[in-house]
Image: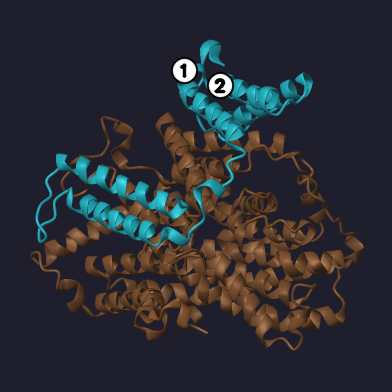
Chain colours: A cyan, B brown
Amino acid sequence: MTTDRLAGAALVLIGIVAIWESRAFPLGSLHRPGPAFMPVLLAALLILFGLAVAAMGAAAGRLLDVGWSEWRHAAAIFGCCAFAAWGLDRLGYRLTMGVVLAVLFLALERLTVMASVALTVAMAWGSFYLFDTLLKVPLPRGPFGL
Amino acid sequence: MLETLQNLGLGFSVALAPGVLWYGFIGCLVGTLVGVLPGVGPLAGISLLLPATYGLDATRALVMLAGIYYGAMYGGSTTSILMRIPGEAASVMTCIDGYAMARKGRAGPALAIAAVGSYVAGTVSVVALMLLAPPLASFALRFGPPEYFSLLLLGLLVLAYMNSGSMLKGLAMAALGLLLGMIGIDQMSGYFRFAYGVTELGDGIGVVPVAVGLFGLAEILLTAGQRDRPEVIRPRLADLLPSRQEWREAHMPIWRGTAIGFLIGIIPGSAHVISTFVSYAVERKISKHPEEFGRGAVAGVAGPESANNAATSGAFVPMLALGVPGVPIAALLLAAMMIHGVTPGPLLIDQDPKLFWGFIASMYVGNVILLILNLPLVGLFVNLLRVPYPVLYPLIVVCSILGVYAVNSSVVDVWIMLAMGILGYVLRKLDFETAPIVLGLVLAPMMELSLRQSLAMSAGSYAIFVTRPISVTLLAVGAVLVILALRPFITRSLDWRSRLPAETEG
């Protein structure tokens, strides 16, 4: 399996899903396009391109040769970002970012406790002060106004 | 000409007002820092700092964001020359001879030539922008929906053609971006498409979360776990001045790079990157000593550095004159204009001359600020690279989340950014370029609306696209590009030698 074959197959799948989901809207006609016309047209193009990418993908790099050595680290960073998305409206900006940064510095990057706490507080509270207080960009507050 | 000079005078009265000048300076400073930091390109930099402009008026916001853009182009050369790490993609060519010059003890002159080349290219290309944008905008007033549709289609084809990878992959990514652009309320029928009950998707997927996810977060995920601190060559301030011979060698490449960069910059696609490659190739081709390229040739620094800065102004031509972004950064700047209540397009020059001419004049001023900033403060900027990556990337993560959330105060945008981060990470691993996705996303609503309006105008006849002169010309250019892209396959299949069995060859 090559990288282009996998990518081509994924593009075809996305195109098929888009066409399936477009059933909910009127397609219209070629001369009077409805709201589903353009999505179906684009999905069909995506399928076409996906098939072409897959068909010409024999010479592309092998999927097994793609290095994924950083995936654990990347997954941990992604998890922290997902926690931030979940927590922003519930815990407020400062607490959420505080947790995210503490996990990144302490658990992931293994900085010392002192350095981690100092950087966490400086970044979470500092960015809040800069954007919310000085630049008047409203950021969410959590329990106890934090 | 007199009218242009009068307008430029108006522009300078806006750009030199202390408030605007200050934000131009901040933009240039931040842009240089963004350019110096590997992995944080101008696109991610502008996306992250967009919320910081919400409290400003449109002129200040645009001047600051544009400052970040060309500041990043200047800053990218510093790491290329001193560390052989391109701060952003357009500085890749500078790495070759810039770093070789630094290894030979000529780091200071290499930086000075890059800065002066960037200054000359930036200033001259702004003159070209100033002369070209207003007539192009007047011409664009003749555009109706069919012409806009053909123009947007051509833009996507050119983008895919100029893609540094294959045209097919570029088109596939553009189609994916266009499909993403279908999410939200259909402008003509009012149907809520592909939103699955998420009301925040009514206005569609925002360009900021997509850009930050694809370019910012994906980069962080790709470089996760990296701990190496690269070697940095530190030039002394006293050693910055190039010799007379070096000036002589840099002189013509700077002018040629400026012309090449501006012309390629107007064309949609990865203009900055392509312009540097073309400039480097041209310099090497016409050089009397091509063997010096790769070993510290002055022309190898002067040409590409001038080209990438001239391309910056070139990219503003379609954005300001037509309201059509040619590159993802222009798409972000257009989004910023709309956030600030400015309608981009050919009417902008007449409706908001202060903004338009103030923006143009601020680019002259910005180039001077950057020249002053870049040379004496190079040591300061280089120090930023001493910050360990494990400390730096969490700050970028915070800025990404903050920047995306602040656009609409919505966590839905943060989730979109995460999804795009994963998509960008996987696509980069599979060797796909992600820039066409952003452009497709921005162009999708315009393209759909102009197609449907055109068909409404012609009572459903597609002949409207080929019976109007401007539209048919644009489509013909697009068709030529497709034929050019297909030519290798056609000639290979027509060539009888390629069908011979392998054993009869040789």
Query: Which of B122 and B223 lies nearest the eye of the viewer?
Result: B223
Query: Which of A89 and A28 lies nearest the eye of the viewer?
Result: A28
Residue at the image point whose x is 11% and y is 60% from the top: A30
Residue B283 visible in the picture: yes
Residue at the image point whose x is 26% and y is 32% from the top: B196
- Report, in whole angstroms, how far the alpha carbon at label 1 lies from the one at label 2: 9 Å
Q: Circle 2: is it few (<14), some (14-19), or many (20+) Cα within 10 Å?
A: many
Task: Using the rendered view, name the quadrant where residue B145 is placed.
Answer: bottom left
Residue at the image point whose x is 48% and y is 27% from the top: A85
Task: Using the rendered view, name the quadrant where residue B28 is placed.
Answer: bottom right
- Left or right for B449, reference B288: left
Please tell me which of labels 1 and 2 falls first in the chain: 1
Is disc 2 placed on a helix, strand or loop?
helix
Find out whether the residues at labels 1 and 2 contact each other: C-beta distance under 8 Å: yes
- Left or right for B37, reference B208: right
Q: Position of residue A122 (x, y in %)?
A: 70, 27
Say the numbered circle drawn on residue A90: 1
- Left or right for B15, reference A55: right
Residue at the image point whose x is 76% and y is 45% from the top: B384
Q: Is residue B492 above or below residue B440?
A: below
Q: Which residue is mark 2?
A: A96
User: Which chain does tag 2 point to?
Assistant: A
Q: Position of residue A104 (x, y in %)?
A: 65, 27
Q: Position of residue A17 (x, y in %)?
A: 26, 42
